[in-house]
Amino acid sequence: MYIWFQPTGGLPQPGTSSCPATLAAPPEVSPGLVLSAFRRIPLPASELVVQPPGGRTLVNFETNFYTEQGEFTRVVRLLGRRVVLRIWPDSFTWVYGDGSSERTSSAGSPYPDLEITHRYVAKGRVAVRVDTTYAADFRVGGGPWRGVDGTVTIPGEAEGLRVVTARPVLVGG
């Protein structure tokens, strides 16, 4: 038996019910809330690898670029619930430092597989970097995976590269 009280302070009104007053459902972890959390998670910048190594390349030479960033997970708590984020690089923006850039879905690869290359046409110093755009899926508890409706771009750290000219020289044998 449950007893209800009048809001005006009157006498209690006895009554019976099979359940108490309806309780509000616990708040649901929404895709918007997950996107907001995804944007706040510290995500790693991709480490840029330049070939040839040593911070120098040649004018009119196919300079190779790649990174080795893969999929990973992060766990957050939202509204008291465990939320798992499966995060992966969705795209890469290669900033070559000479005013040009390129966006790819590939992380490139080391020599001899020249996937991401750039040919510099003038000598000088440039600052190159790779910006990584991450996408994610999430699940609450052990529920099904759902896509996060949005991405996060993490700028890479600029690396100095010196573009030089070379003069061919014949060497006697």
Image (cartoon, rainbow, N blue to C red):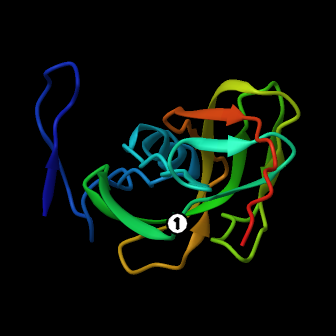
Is 91 placed above or below 13 here?
below
In this figure, which residue is indicated by the disc labeled 1?
68
State the residue in front, 74 or 90. Answer: 90
Residue at position x 55%, y 35% in the image: 155
Q: Secondary structure at mark 1?
A: loop
Q: Residue furthest front?
A: 172
Which residue is located at x 29 percent, y 60 percent?
81
For the image, the number of numbered tags is: 1
Give the percent coordinates (x, y) of residue 64. 71, 58
Question: x, y percentage for residue 102?
Answer: 82, 44
Q: Which one is in front, 53 or 2?
A: 53
Quarter of the image with the C terminus is bottom right
Can you say whether 125 is above or below 60 in the image? above
How packed mark 1 is, by other alpha carbons closer than 10 Å (few <14, some 14-19, many 20 or more), is few
Residue for point 35% across, 54% down = 26
Residue 41 percent across, percent down from the top left: 38, 44
In which quadrant of the rendered view does residue 116 lie? bottom right
Q: Amino acid at mark 1?
A: Glu
